[in-house]
Amino acid sequence: MPLFFHPLYTDGIAKDARFPRDRYRRLSRRLQLGEAGELIQIIEAPAATLEDVLVAHERAYATRFLDGSMSVKERRRIGLRPWTPLLIPRTLHLMGGALGALACVAERGGVAGNMAGGTHHAHWDFGSGYCVFNDLAVCARTAHRDYGFKRIMILDLDVHQGDGTATILADDPFAQTISVHCAENFPLRKTQSDRDFAVPMGTGDEAYLEVVHDALAFGLAQAPDLIFFQAGVDGLSADALGRLELSQQGMWRRNQLVFDACLARRIPCVVFMGGGYSKPIDATVVAFEDLFVQAARAHKSLLS
């Protein structure tokens, strides 16, 4: 399975940032071993262009970020502090990795992923919640315009609502936004997805998986020809920001529900990594390793 990565996913964030930047490098090393190493092809993510970004973002906002002229207030809202100039190429490679994964499934089918991204809090003209540009929205519009996909299901299972994705794609009939998230969590002011499934703080495996099942059923009823899976693992009980009580096994079962649906209907899938902030970070890295191994197995089955 093709999986995109770039060293800037880690190195483009300041060493003393609160954001757990080491998760990317640690994960990339683990995915080169054992079954993961046999099933996954790690590809260096190319850099996206300004024109790629403008598919889903205001030119003035994108230009301010790329030329380094954003205000302190704008940077604070994004939250990747302390700010470093390397965030600019990092963001472009992150977007390039998402677009590269999209190109792989558009050309060959199956599953592909990006070892970063799922930047669902970025809106048309501002960034938020560690998100600068919205890779889900950019990829959805690119998939429709350049690759001819007619019905794109964006299934966001990060513990935080996909608010930016919902607002950017609100008037795009080819894109269906579905968010399963913790009700009592960031963002404080929720937007409206095509369908929101808000679960209460403290929800455990069984109740959560029932909601994921319902969300999948809702989305699949629209007969999508492409699925975007925002696969944040910040719902783990060990997560510092999650507020749910999901186990590693529960997270594995969640992923498998999604991949089994893709297999049953032969629908290609792009996996966006999403959030994960466990302290220590080990639980997050293990959950993401599970995710991408499961994705790689699904990719192998879809192409067999």
Image (cartoon, rainbow, N blue to C red):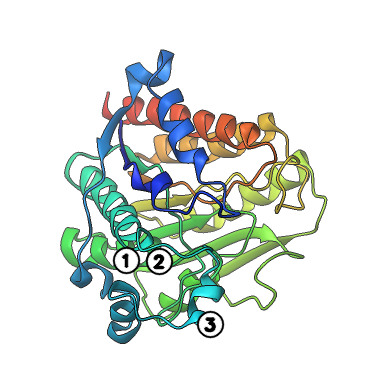
Q: Quadrant of the C terminus?
A: top left
Q: What is the crowding at mark 3: few (fewer than 14 residues within 10 Å), some, or many (at least 20)?
A: few
* Label of residue 73 in the image: 3
The spot of residue 246 in percent (x, y) is: 73, 40
* Label of residue 120 in the image: none
167 over 86 or under it: above or below: below
Q: Residue at x 70, y 42 (%)?
A: 236
SS class of the residue under badge 3?
A: helix
* Label of residue 134 in the image: 2
Image quarter of residue 297: top left
Q: What is the crowding at mark 1: few (fewer than 14 residues within 10 Å), some, or many (at least 20)?
A: many
Q: Residue at x 64, y 55 (%)?
A: 159
The spot of residue 53 in percent (x, y) is: 27, 70
Counting residues from the start of the chain, the first of labels 2 and 3 encountered is 3
1 over 265 or under it: above or below: above
CA separation, marks 3 and 1? 24 Å
238 over 118 or under it: above or below: above
Label 3 is placed on what type of residue? Lys
Q: Residue at x 36, y 60 (%)?
A: 152
Q: Quadrant of the N terminus?
A: top left
Viewed as shown, does residue 238 lie left or right of 31? right
The spot of residue 208 in percent (x, y) is: 72, 47
SS class of the residue under badge 2?
A: loop
282 over 200 or under it: above or below: above
Image quarter of residue 58: bottom left
Label 2 is placed on what type of residue? Asn
The residue to which callout 1 is attached is 138
